[in-house]
Amino acid sequence: MIAAGKTYKWDTFKNSDPLDYFYSHTDFNRMHKETLRLIDHRLKIFKNKWEKEAFEHIKVNYTNNQGQNY
């Protein structure tokens, strides 16, 4: 969602776009609740932090906790 947003909205892309897209285009009934929680959490981090900080946060937490820190 992040890469697609940057590709298609390159001149108007905002950090909130991937999360907004996720909420408006996801069938939450068809997604496992833990997968939903993980994606939601990661996109919120991306929305609220700069890209480099967001990816570093995700990398550190995933590496140290095998993705369970969400």
Image: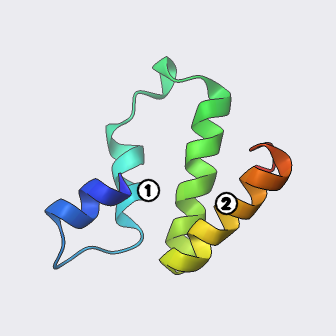
Location of residue 27 by image quarter = top left
Q: To which residue does mark 2 refer?
A: 59
> According to the image, what is the colour scheme of the structure?
rainbow
Residue drawn at the location 53% of the way across and 78% of the way down:
52
Location of residue 64 by image quarter = bottom right
Toward the front, the furthest residue is 63
Closest to the camera, between mark 2 and mark 1, is: 2
Q: Position of residue 44 (x, y in %)?
A: 57, 62
Nearest the eye: 64 or 53: 64
* Above or below: residue 31 compared with residue 25: above
Toward the top, the furthest residue is 30
* Above or below: residue 34 compared with residue 60: above
Q: Position of residue 34 (x, y in %)?
A: 68, 31
**Relative to residue 70, is residue 38 drawn left or right?**
left
Q: Earlier in the sequence, mark 2 or mark 1?
A: 1
Q: Secondary structure at mark 1?
A: helix
* Above or below: residue 46 compared with residue 62: below
The numbered disc on residue 41 is none
Residue drawn at the location 32% of the way across and 39% of the way down:
25
